Image (tube, rainbow, N blue to C red):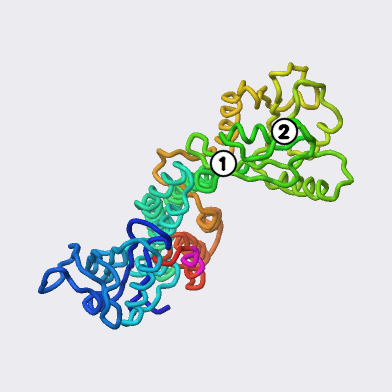
Amino acid sequence: MVTDDTIAAPATPLGEGGIGIVRISGPASETLLKKRFLPSRPIDRFHSHRLYHGTILSSDGKPLDEVLAVVMRKPRSYTCEDVVEVQCHGGPFVVRKILESFIVAGARLAAPGEFTLRAFLNGRIDLTRAEAVIDLIRSRSQKAVTVALQQLEGRLGNHLAEIRQEIIELLVIIEAYVDFPEEDMATLHMDQLEKQSLGVLQKIDKLLDSFNFGRVAREGLGILLVGRPNVGKSSLLNYLLGEDRAIVTSIPGTTRDTIEELWALDGFSLRLIDTAGIHDSNDPVEAEGMRRTLEKIRSADLILLVVDGSRDLDAFDEKSLDACDVSKTVLVVNKSDLGQREVKAPFSTLPRVRVSALSGDGMEDLKKMILHQVTRNCSGGDMGESAILSSRRHWESLNRCRGNLTSFVDSLGAAVPYECLAVDLREAVQSIGEVTGETLPEEVLNRIFSRFCIGK
């Protein structure tokens, strides 16, 4: 990958706004600024990290916009290269014309994530912190922001670096005996090696256990509203969202397709999904809606099985129950304002709450029930932890590291050649390096950074 040229891109989203920013990074950044920037008062040279007022000119010398420009000389910049940022008015046309003027002057349009890629390649940040940048940009809840910020400040990367160093220290001891086999193995103190290895495994297990919490904080959970037609699923959705998102009528089968909306609860980002009612129908549109409902049930994190509590539950309610995984299902007995019938088997075994989507009765109890189920899904993590795993890629690599280290511990008591012990430890170092970026192939790096927006 080419990293020694000069790149440019908008650092702010294209669209109308008060300010737009064009970012330039590379060895020719300051030279390009001098070609296109006319300061409002004469200056001898640009001082680093100081704002200058002036006008940006096109390639033919015409004014494009009144701007503020700043030079950030290496290594005190985001990319550890010479960086220039031009702050202009936020209209998309103005930003585009300023960017074009720098491209004509010799810059190359940056690829998605290329600024952060350069920050990583130049040692400014490790890969966990680089990935935290995109997680922070895409965060949709307070907990997602908190986890991303912890990762961005280096908690995860620093913790992994400590674990990696401990494994390397074990490897150094084993490789010494590979290089000098005449030494007495008894002096290696196998018990001490095992104790050190188990200590490292304990740290790895703690990190792996934090993944459930980190994943939910980062990605949220999908909550599915399921039930026969006309039990109030759409009314329930509207009440929780605080807006009339779904059409509500007294006609059964009004909802024929899934409706998905984001909902924030206690800092978590949850996806509320209203579905078509489950019943017998010859209508092909309704049948397709029910097929999609059954498909969603299989992938849902939590199911709210909604029933009409003002009447006895029947075969259609049981049909809805049969489609659900009871281990992740909560019974929501709606229409409590119209009377309450006894909940009998097989429904009585489910955790349940009585509500009225019309009056709001029981809604706080429902929220508490949902929050209880959500936190049950993400046990093992806590915002006070020193580090939290939130990426499946990180979890998979760290789990491989755990397997390598477990194999090493299991082999310590057996008559295994030192070379084989060293292989396990080398692979453990390789696996943990995939998380922080020391040992990741270039094509994987490119795939990770391609998720970024242009300009970041």
Comes first in the chain, label 1 or label 2: 1
Q: Image height check: is 447 above or below 293? A: below
Let me know if residue 448 is in the magenta part.
Answer: yes
Quadrant of residue 40 within the rendered picture? bottom left
Q: Position of residue 250 (x, y in %)?
A: 76, 32
To which residue does mark 1 refer? Answer: 270
Decide which of 21, 325 is in the foreground and name it.
Answer: 21
To which residue does mark 2 refer? Answer: 305
Q: Image height check: is 447 above or below 207? A: below
Residue at (76, 20) in percent of width and height: 310
Do we see residue 16 in this rendering? yes
Magenta segment: 447-451
Q: Position of residue 72 (x, y in %)?
A: 23, 66
- The amino acid type found where label 1 is placed reads Leu
Quadrant of residue 173 within the rendered picture? bottom left
Q: Give the SS element for disc 2.
A: strand
Q: Position of residue 365 (x, y in %)?
A: 59, 24
Q: Position of residue 211 (x, y in %)?
A: 52, 46
Q: Give the SS element for disc 1.
A: strand
Residue at (55, 35) in percent of width and height: 375
- The amino acid type found where label 2 is placed reads Leu
Residue at (44, 72) in percent of width and height: 111
Decide which of 362, 234 is in the foreground and name it.
Answer: 234
